[in-house]
Image (spheres, coloured by chain):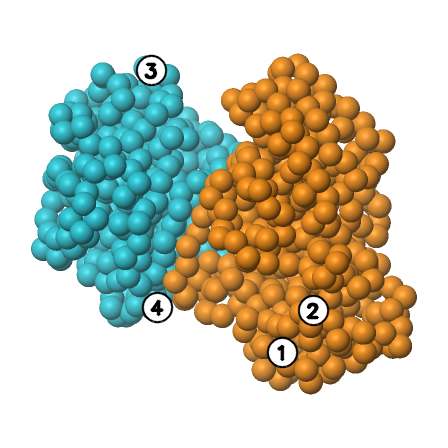
Chain colours: A orange, B cyan
Amino acid sequence: MENFKYYNPTKVFFGKDVLEQLCTEISPMGKKALLVIGKNSVKTSGLYARVVSLMNICGVSHYTYEGIKANPIVQHADEAVALAKEKQVSMIIAIGGGSVIDTAKAIAIGYYVNHSVWDFYTQKVAKPTQALPLFTILTLAATGTEMNSGSVLQHNASGMKLGYSAPCMFPKVSFLDPHLTLTVPANQTAFGISDLISHALEQFFGKGESPLSDLYTASVIKLAIKYGQKLMLNLQDYEAREQIMWLATNALNGTLKAGKNAGDWGVHDFEHTLSVLYDIAHGAGLSIVYPAWLRHHQPIINAKLAFLATKVFDIDESDENLAASIFIKKLESFYKLIGTPVKLNEVGILPSERNTILSNLKFNKVNGSVYTLNETDYEQILDRMW
Amino acid sequence: MENFKYYNPTKVFFGKDVLEQLCTEISPMGKKALLVIGKNSVKTSGLYARVVSLMNICGVSHYTYEGIKANPIVQHADEAVALAKEKQVSMIIAIGGGSVIDTAKAIAIGYYVNHSVWDFYTQKVAKPTQALPLFTILTLAATGTEMNSGSVLQHNASGMKLGYSAPCMFPKVSFLDPHLTLTVPANQTAFGISDLISHALEQFFGKGESPLSDLYTASVIKLAIKYGQKLMLNLQDYEAREQIMWLATNALNGTLKAGKNAGDWGVHDFEHTLSVLYDIAHGAGLSIVYPAWLRHHQPIINAKLAFLATKVFDIDESDENLAASIFIKKLESFYKLIGTPVKLNEVGILPSERNTILSNLKFNKVNGSVYTLNETDYEQILDRMW
């Protein structure tokens, strides 16, 4: 195993009606909170009103920053920091999915500095040591951000999308009630499942031998496929919703990476180029890039893929190359089944965009930490996506 | 799934030479520490001197409480609290295995009160809200206490052995260097493996359906058996030592219980009676009680055992009852192979002790939270142990 540090101080309340714990948790943190939300859905669903009502009961007043986009942008984080400073809030409550929570993490660290949060992400300044306490109320099972210290933001002017993390960016408390995901539409549900599977795979392809992490990873992917299929038959299936929600959290809360380095993340880096350029859903981009990336690298990852074939799909096949091919094919079939795209033309990106994409890949120096990518790799992987 | 809370703020440094991080971690906590150690082994191994030297370098002075027993007792914790108060230390550093760390947790909460720590364990007083920061340097892979908030102490005068936990009892930082376990003798190594497997099983038999926790549990047991066998062939096998160390931590750090209630714990409760009465190693008692408990309950846990048979031992057997029997038999064979006892007479407890044990089981109201035990159960389970 590689040496590793494991640290995750986020307190998670999981299950039915866990919001009943909200007052107890936020009350010690002060009297004024910034609520961060997306466009309309948490207002139309009534969740926003419910949270405000709970806050009123425990005497915490609120100011709201709304309008976070699905691919969250730096500008919104900076605007929200200004609001948080003006109102002198002492905590942040994020209600939404990964984009809202990632933005809220940026706001939490931006509160204590006098520059754009983007300066953190570009590593122009040192890591932050202070952040406002962050509470999250999750409405979409996907990114795992509710229980980690990472955040991804997009900077439109530069065409960059960067991930960033610091120990002070862990949410203090996250409330995970699967009921809040029952109204997520089919496509967003599928993109979330694609996202969680990709997180498991990125860490699986990290450096270092870690048998326990590998078995845990296979467990997460196996159940994501089982309950993902079940959920697509009935989006109101509570059991499937709760399984997918906890799987998404597990996929990126540190459980799968112990004994490895942080993971490869080349596929994520590659996908960020697509979502920056075309504003497609991150999970949709990932289900397009992953099969192409797996096939591109197959000769050197056959053994790892054969392991997954056995553990995830119960494939009994001693020929590693064959088992590996079956794994990729079955994963791709699963993506198709749940309705997340596997080819670029499905999301309207045509071969005429080839050079634009390649330029952006080069500009952003897209790479994996273990399976490094050069310009030939870019071309060969990209050409598998049409 | 059952509703659950997941919270584990302990920071773990795992791998070779992680003690190099000691200064950085303890320095912010003050200038005086209480070191807590067992009898002699950490002094003869040189580890104690190394820690003292590191503390000298970072300017933290130390006072040492030594002599913690394998089955740790309340009296030692109370004595150490008195020393900690007298010297006005601001942190505790525990060097050792589960007994030393469990005692250190009691000292950490005892520091802020004026009564015996036993009053916490008997729930005579309310849960503590304050504890001295606790750093642990683990030398034995077994109990998982290095990454949880639990502690078990024995009270000789009353013949009671009780577990206790509170959120403030999590270690702040735990240092897990598998090298420090290379000198653990064969019997203690085997007892540690028995202990970690039993922790996985206790949670597996908790209330609630949690498919991910169940797959995680099977992963832990599978690898404990694989690397346990490997380790017994060569106690200096570093790879096996590191696997067993991380497995033991995982077996009781919350990873396996998400979506369940806290677990059954009837076997642990039963075993505590044995180790209180006869001062046998906890892990040795567990490998005796578990096969008996499993056989006693087999008719109502066949499906669960058949799942483990498949996942742990790759048994392909559609008859659940038969698969369950194979699982128990194979688990028992593994215990024998690694040299941890499966019958009471192996640890010198003869049938003439039957009534003494039964009386103590009744006195302590030994029970599981899911698989409840009455006096007939006590007799039937006990009679399977000779």
Distance between the alpha carbons at the discs numbered 4 and 3: 45 Å
Residue B359: quarter of image: top left
Query: Which quadrant does the N terminus of chain A fall into?
Result: bottom left
Left or right, B210 with reference to A254:
right
**Rendered image: mark on residue B125:** 3
- The residue indicated by pointer 4 is B239
Mark 2 residue type: Phe
First in sequence: mark 4 or mark 3? 3
Check whether the beta carbons of the residues at disc 3 and disc 2 lie within 8 A of each other. no
Query: Which quadrant does the C terminus of chain A fall into?
Result: bottom right
Q: Are marks 3 and 2 on the same chain?
A: no
Q: Are marks 2 and 4 on the same chain?
A: no
Residue at position x 75%, y 58% in the image: A157
**Could you tell me residue B46's position as x and y percent?**
12, 57
Q: Which subunit holds the residue at mark 4?
A: B
How many residues crowd around disc 3 within 10 Å: few (fewer than 14), some, or many (20 or more)?
Answer: few
Check whether the beta carbons of the residues at disc 2 and disc 1 lie within 8 A of each other. yes
Check whether the beta carbons of the residues at disc 4 and disc 3 lie within 8 A of each other. no
- The residue indicated by pointer 2 is A270
